[in-house]
């Protein structure tokens, strides 16, 4: 079974259990400043896990592309990935632990589905602590489907408890592992007794509590199930491979890299293999980010900075393999071909992908030249050092400021009789990473973000802003993304030139006029085709596969409305709740895309019924 077949099987199975297939969403989270990318399949479903009604119902399934950036530096070993696919199914107040576990076990072990050996499966459940009891319910369900007791490991909250943050929805989870050791697992072997030989393939999260404070949990009236299966890992196991890089997901990419590297054959040199794996993962990640519906471009901050880092790290390892020409676009073409059926947007946006990769690769090669020039400027002072040692701090500054790799600093140093304090470099790098993680910790809160009254007001304001932009600038305007915090909103849209001061004032005036009119905001659920026929804007029409929620701002949803959009919420009930709208800045975001930053103040309180 290959990855395409696994994707199809998974969706087919859950459809047979009365789940509705929904479309995977953008890699760039909508209105969520807590993370740079969609990090899990549940991320686009946040509003519905928090209680909003999903137009497709209470049983859902999909496949979702994800990016996790926390371990970019670990990518290069046989298992770590930056970009991966998650297969998911959800129950929104419908079934709970019994059916969730039974479905997972049936899909994994039934001869009609994956037919994995039950003897090679083990699970973990929550061991309990002073805040919540041991999850005997999940353990008993596992026993009832045939899981031997010695294959059930009871692990602490650090392993088997999921939480939205310090407060809010939370609950135990149960993780499913497959044996990757030799032969069959010995008696008593499970994740708790032998973590090295068990690979996690699936996680079922049971949201059953609401955390009021650090010590207080209360049962949720509506319990949800959120599950995720890693496609690449499961595909690897199904094929009996020892690494995800040996499957058809990566092999065509790896073969192309080998061809570009003068015919290198993967598997013949571990150091070169590591570079090949880095290029394969990072090129795939870059294509998925650039080819996304809301694809970002290389930048100095945020998601664009991560993309730039991925591209440049791949280019650097291409240089280590002896690839002395621009090559990323050639590798990207293989990625697009390999994934275009599952993700058609990659082929649709391929011209942009190749253009951006080639431009960033050329910039990086220029950066390397600048780094070398900077080194030459420093050389006279370095020559005064009788020990002929380049400090780790200096080497790391070249890397952090100019993107100049440590290995090249070592080469340049050696040519001039210097060595580099590698341990000092690693220490400077460690301090930088710790500072970055501390900064990120304030942003990442487990995936579910607070939907405050202020962010709700900002979200509705984006609807008014987009229609006002269309009214002033014309129908070429289309939303390319938005980002909302409690302090401001950011709205990206297609437009080829800077707005004039008069246009900015005109747009601002229209939005404030509609706010002062106190127009009602109405939500309807209907098929996408009906929504479009009614005049609703649908940002990504190829990514909707079910009934959609349509929000209309106006006195009459059919004959007297200002804005009508397909959207997932949250929204105010009437526009006077938004407050005064002010455009603070209009600037370029990327080629052909402009960015507006705006604030709101005041406004009526939101209805709480």
Image (cartoon, rainbow, N blue to C red):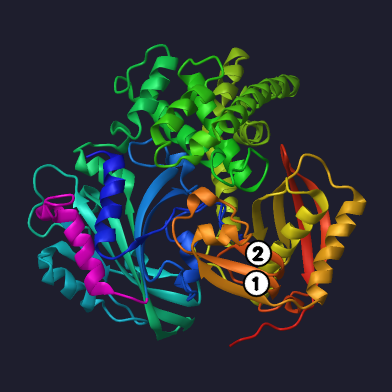
What residue is shown with label 2? 564
Quadrant of the image containing the N terminus: top left
- Is 380 placed above or below 187 here? above
Rendered location of residue 257, percent (x, y): 42, 21
Would residue 595 be found to the left or right of residue 206 on screen? right
- Magenta residues (range): 93-120
Of labels 2 and 1, earlier in sequence is 1
Q: Residue at x 43, y 15 (%)?
A: 261
What residue is shown with label 1? 557
Q: Which mark is residue 578?
A: none
**CB-based contact (under 8 Å), mark 2 and mark 1:** yes
Q: Residue at x 78, y 59 (%)?
A: 468
Tell which of 561 and 76 is nearer to you: 561
Name the secondary structure under disc 1: loop
Badge count = 2
Name the secondary structure under disc 2: strand
- Is 379 placed above or below 73 here? above
The quarter of the picture where residue 366 lies is top right
Q: Can residue 408 be seen in this view?
A: yes
């Amino acid at each position: 079974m290959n990855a395409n077949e696994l994707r199809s099987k998974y969706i087919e199975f859950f459809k047979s259990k009365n789940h509705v297939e929904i479309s995977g969403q953008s890699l760039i989270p909508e209105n969520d400043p807590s993370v740079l990318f969609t990090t899990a399949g549940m991320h686009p479903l946040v509003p519905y896990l928090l209680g909003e009604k999903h137009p497709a119902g209470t049983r859902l399934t999909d496949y979702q592309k994800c990016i996790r950036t926390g371990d970019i530096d670990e990518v290069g070993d046989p298992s770590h990935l930056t970009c991966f696919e998650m297969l998911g199914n959800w129950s929104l107040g419908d079934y709970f632990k019994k059916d969730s576990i039974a479905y997972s076990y049936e899909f994994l072990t039934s001869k009609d589905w994956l037919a994995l050996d039950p003897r090679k499966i083990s699970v973990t459940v929550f061991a309990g602590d002073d805040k919540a009891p041991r999850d005997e319910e999940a353990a008993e369900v596992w026993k009832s489907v045939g899981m031997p007791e010695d294959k059930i490991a009871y692990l602490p909250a650090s392993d088997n408890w999921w939480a939205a943050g310090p407060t809010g929805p939370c609950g135990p989870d149960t993780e499913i592992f497959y044996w990757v050791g030799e032969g069959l697992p010995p008696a008593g072997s499970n994740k708790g007794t032998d973590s090295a030989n068990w690979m996690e393939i699936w996680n079922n999260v049971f949201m059953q509590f609401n955390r009021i404070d650090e010590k207080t949990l209360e049962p949720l009236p509506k319990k949800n199930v959120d599950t995720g299966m890693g496609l690449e890992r499961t595909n690897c196991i199904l094929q009996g491979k020892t690494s995800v890089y040996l499957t058809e997901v990566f092999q065509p990419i790896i073969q192309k890299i080998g061809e570009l590297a003068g015919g290198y054959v993967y598997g013949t040199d571990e150091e070169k293999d590591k570079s090949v794996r880095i290029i394969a993962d990072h090129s795939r990640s870059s294509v998925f980010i650039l080819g996304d519906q809301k694809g970002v471009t290389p930048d100095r901050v945020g998601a664009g900075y991560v993309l730039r880092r991925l591209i440049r790290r791949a280019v650097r390892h291409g240089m280590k393999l002896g690839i002395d020409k621009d090559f990323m676009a050639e590798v990207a073409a293989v990625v697009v071909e390999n994934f275009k059926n599952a993700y058609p947007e990659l082929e649709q946006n391929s011209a942009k992908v190749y253009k951006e990769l080639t431009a960033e690769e050329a910039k990086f090669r220029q950066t390397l030249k600048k780094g070398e020039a900077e080194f030459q400027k420093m050389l006279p002072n370095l020559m005064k050092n009788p020990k002929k040692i380049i400090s780790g701090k200096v080497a790391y500054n070249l890397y952090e400021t100019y993107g100049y790799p440590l290995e090249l600093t070592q080469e340049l140093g050696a040519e001039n009789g210097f060595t580099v304090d590698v341990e000092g470099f690693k220490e400077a790098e460690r301090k930088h990473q710790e500072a970055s993680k501390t900064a990120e910790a304030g942003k990442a809160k487990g995936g579910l973000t607070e939907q405050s009254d202020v962010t709700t007001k900002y979200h509705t304001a984006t609807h008014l802003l987009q229609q006002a932009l269309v009214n002033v600038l014309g129908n070429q305007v289309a939303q390319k993304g938005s980002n909302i915090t409690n302090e401001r909103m950011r709205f990206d849209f297609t437009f080829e030139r800077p707005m004039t001061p008069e246009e900015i004032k005109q747009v601002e005036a229209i939005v404030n006029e509609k706010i002062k009119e106190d127009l009602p905001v109405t939500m309807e659920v209907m098929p996408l085709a009906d929504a479009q026929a009614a005049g609703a804007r649908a940002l990504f029409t190829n990514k909707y596969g079910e009934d959609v929620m349509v929000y209309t701002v106006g006195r009459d949803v059919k004959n007297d409305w200002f804005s009508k959009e397909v959207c997932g919420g949250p929204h105010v009930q009437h526009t006077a709740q938004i407050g005064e709208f002010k455009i603070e800045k209009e600037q370029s975001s990327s080629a052909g895309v402009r960015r507006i930053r705006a604030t709101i103040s005041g406004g009526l309180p939101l209805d709480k019924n």
